[in-house]
Image (tube, rainbow, N blue to C red):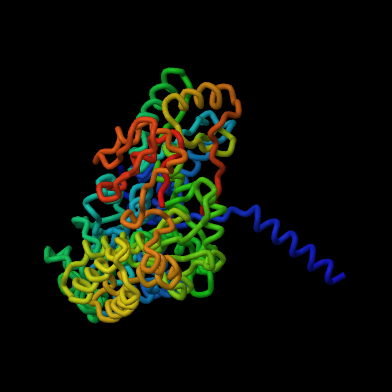
Amino acid sequence: MAKLDSAASLSQMRDQLKVRNSELSSKDSPQSTIQVKVTMATCGIASGSRPVFDYMKEELGKRNIPALVTKVGCMGFCYAEPTIEITMPGKAPVMFGFVNTKKADEIIERFIRKGETIEGVIPMNYEIA
Amino acid sequence: MKRGTWHVARITCSLSRKNMAKQIRIALRNCGVIDPERIEDYISRDGYMALATVLTELTPGAVIEIMKKSGLRGRGGGGFPAGLKWEITRKVQADQKYVVCNADEGDPGAFMDRSILEGDPHSVLEAMAINGYCTGASKGLVYIRAEYPLAIDRLKTAMKQAREMGLLGDNILGTGFNFDIDIRYGAGAFVCGEETALIHSMEGLRGEPTVKPPFPSVEGYLKKPTNVNNVETFANVPVIINKGWEWFSSIGTEKSKGTKVFALAGKINNVGLVEVPMGTTLREVIYEIGGGIQYGKEFKAAQTGGPSGGCLTKKHLDTPIDYDNLIAAGSMMGSGGLIVMDEDDCMVAIAKFYLEFTVEESCGKCSPCRIGNKRLHEILGKITQGNGTMEDIDKLRNLGQVIKDTSLCGLGQSSPNPVLSTIDNFIEEYLEHVKDKKCRSKVCKSLMQYLVLPEKCIGCTLCARNCPVNAISGERKQAHLIDQEKCIKCGACLEKCKFNAIIIN
């Protein structure tokens, strides 16, 4: 990583990253991709999010579905861990709870591939500042 | 017509309130959103922009003014105004000053700080650098429990990345400002969350508190001025700079601004980490966000502030939660643990549980805390065993007050709170334990008897065969009998009986 030598270079970097991120989640951009976030704080890992993370990464690759799988911190839904959040390009994020590899398979095949509505969605109940 | 308009306005208002999300995530804004191990993710969400603004556009005094106007108060428990603390540290003349982040989260059931450090470590680093700029410190230290290995890992990764990008270290962003951060590990002693004990522990001494003043802001780590703030307090700082103090102070109540993160636990449906504006009521937190009490049972109490806090009851359900209201209700904000209890929880046993923790964690330096809490615990033990007297309840009250008034540090000054607040709010349960020798929640084993109902018992012998201490006797096909002398109240018989013939008296 190159050293940032001024406030201007930081804000330039931020702007570039923002553009990249909006391209990732936009429907029409050639960079657009499905974004998968797996909660991997201590609590998430303890309730089994690591195998889910590995599974999503491997299986999405194997099944030729372009996706960006990232690990994130706590989403706050301890009662429903492991939780994962899927953002389809151009759409609002959808959060799933109690995800194991079997559920992950269902999410890939039915929700991601076919766009079906499936069970296990956690309603978002907060706004982010 | 005026009345009509007013009426409509009220309806729209209540409707929009209902649909509005109750939670606003400020401290947790990036948790669950960014990859905590990628600094680019943090930067893409305006990360380190607050530091850049502060370093290039604002004087330290101006930043402190913003912090003071924002009304941000310490989120670690005490609720001391953060801006004021920064100002005090700034005003002291010294060749070296320190910024310390208190990540010694020790309350049972609290995990706000861990979640922030694991989900968004850069926000804390950025805020510490801002604090360093304001107070004149060039060195930051994070005091974190060694029991948080993942948080430590992510913190280290974040520090490494920030250094590589020139956001920590010498000449940050080419402004000539130098600031770097190091980690110090705590061994998990509850008292080390108290700032003077924390500083001693960092110096390699015993984790014992000392009398304040001098406050750490004046004389702290290595006798140098040291600004100690909690993880959650720091996590709020960059947003305040980016969005302005006006925005921040528009959230919350008159004297408590912004939001508070609570670790919602206990007998509640949606156990989780929530962040609500100050002034949200307990009812909203428990029933709307928490999804209500498990198995449709009745709410009895909510314990806030961990072992230093007290219990809030049904009558507090509609009290807006903020620093001052919680103190007035005999509890405290603490670091934000919120444990919900239902009808199956015995309040005397709960008080005893917290005292057990305090007795274990008292550093032993001052006698009110060392001896007093031990005595409180013994008296509670006596009561839960059915040997309590009315005098014992008075003793609990008096002794509790003395411990509060005379202890050296915050641990002892608050440790009797669980006892005093349960006596205040649930005196009838204490009286039942003492006078009737009964525990209505069927928690205190010494006050319980397992009995066989002869009319329901068919003499299948299943209970007798499963009793680990052979306390159950009886002929086949005849009603059985439990020997109360031998019975250890394990409940195995009750669990095994298929005919509901065993009851707890």
For this rendering, which residue is in front, A107 or B248? A107
The residue shown at (26%, 60%) is B357
| Most distant residue in the left direction | B205
| Most distant residue in the top direction | A63
Residue B104: which quarter of the image?
bottom left
Residue B391 visible in the picture: yes
Find residue B256 and report its horizontal and vertical position in percent: 48, 71
For this rendering, which residue is in front, B327 or B225? B327
B488 over B130 or under it: above or below? above
For this rendering, which residue is in front, B249 or A22? B249
The residue shown at (37%, 73%) is B80
Pick the quarter of the image with the N terminus of chain A: top left
Q: Is residue B29 left or right of residue B218?
A: right
Residue B56 visible in the picture: no
Find residue A18 and report its horizontal and vertical position in percent: 48, 44
Find residue B1 and report its horizontal and vertical position in percent: 87, 70
Residue B194: which quarter of the image?
bottom left
